[in-house]
Image (spheres, rainbow, N blue to C red):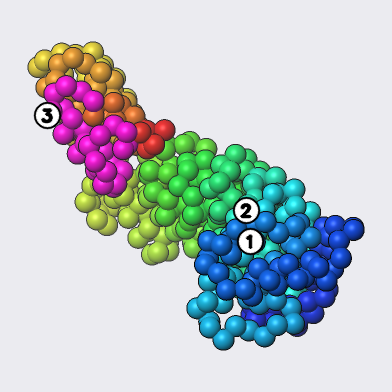
Amino acid sequence: MGDQRGKGRGGGLGSLARALAVASVLASAGRAQEGARGELERALSEPCAPAELRRRLFGLDASELPRLFAFAVEGHLPGAGPDDDALRAESRRELVREVLAARPRRELVPFLEDLAGRPAETGVRLEALRLLGAIGCGDHLKLLARLAVAPQERGALAPELREAFTSALGAILVRDPAALSQMAALFSESSPCLASSIVEALAGLRAPQATRVLAGLLGRVPGLDPLLLVRLAERGRMHAAGDESVFDAVRRYLKQRDPALVCAAARACGRLGDDGAVEALVGLMDHSDARVKASAFQALADITGLGFGTDAARWTSWYHAEMRWWDGEAESLLAGIERGRGLEFVRAAREVLEHRLYRDRIAESFTQALTRKNAEEVRLACRALEQLRSTQAIAGLVECLERDDPAVREAAWHALRAITGVELPPERDSWAQLAG
């Protein structure tokens, strides 16, 4: 495959007989080959509307599958010249792809299994990846990897194959979220040249479970850790959902010797909103590497929302004051938010909101107040949660969108938009998916 790696789709079936032989087992034993060819050629050559052509192609026998696939690769039938009308040719090609993807899996999977076990040129493999991405589920992840990397292939994967594999894997994961549980095994058992593509496919998913899988891949392939930390940072608070397993996996890299890894980990801790990393980040403010120090300051700002810049003394003083508050006063004040009423609730809320460490824990107390009957207290809790920006409050705020008081509904809607960065209508159903 090394000498074919740069070829485009146009040269995909230079040895078409070999590609067609891959799926010849699908041919009906008693069917005449010439009759079969005539049926497909008539369907494609006789003038008709797209709807009629689709109907004809859907009605073809399973024995036509190899030649339908060949048409999807080449854009024309074997032995026939390219269509002079490029727009018409591409339209028919997309229609054939649609028809192929609608065939039963019991036909397509054996076809692709055979193809994966034989040498095939880049164009064929690209089309096979596209097809499996359109119809596959978690049961087909290993087949997808074999289609991307040919048997006994060594060296780097062609960029177009890497892109096609990433796209197909992402499509399968969207279609079958349960397949996320198989990603660690796929990562371990697949060719090393697919590792970064697996990471990119996972990074394209919004689900918090994808964040956990990405974090679980840290340390598996050392050279991949910088990419994993960058992709984790890009997911932000919304897709970390306060998951300690994610925080722990990233936090360990703050102790690495490599400044580049420490910088990447600090940025990830900041973007993910990991309060538990603050102590380590404060310690990094005296690091010998200027890049590490800059990353630590930025991470502290991201986590707390405070604007102390690069003033190490101010950050240190703030951190010690916060820890003293948590050790001494926090418990009684949080209880005042959870159980207090009237003026006691207001005073406790005002003081607690002056503190910016462990905001998820503070948000838990305000979230409990969302269920109260007193509309003014609920509205104040919504405004506090808007300020805290904690994802822990999303489900409770979504429920508030159905409260009778319009001021409560509006306050909950503003808080949801501030926390998620998403603009949706102020109706519960619009936000239900984010509530998990």
**Closer to us: 285 or 29:** 29
Q: Residues within 10 Å of mark 2 (few under 14, many from 20)?
A: some
Look at the image and say whether residue 44 sits in the magenta stretch: no
User: Which image quadrant for residue 122?
Assistant: bottom right
Say above or below: 48 vs 354: below
The residue that disc 1 covers is 56
Magenta region: which residues?
402-431
The residue that disc 3 covers is 407
User: Which image quadrant for residue 9?
Assistant: bottom right
Q: Secondary structure at mark 2?
A: helix
How far apart are the two marked residues, 3 and 2, measured between alpha carbons? Answer: 50 Å
Front of the two marks 1 and 2: 1
* Residue type pointed to by label 1: Arg
How far apart are the two marked residues, 1 and 2, measured between alpha carbons? Answer: 13 Å
Q: Secondary structure at mark 3?
A: helix
Quadrant in which the C terminus is drawn: top left
Quadrant in which the N terminus is drawn: bottom right
- N-terminal of the pair, mark 3 or mark 1, is 1
- N-terminal of the pair, mark 1 or mark 2, is 1
Residue 67 screen position, x and y as percent = 74, 68
Residue 117 screen position, x and y as percent = 82, 62
* Residue type pointed to by label 3: Ala
Q: Residues within 10 Å of mark 1 (few under 14, many from 20)?
A: some
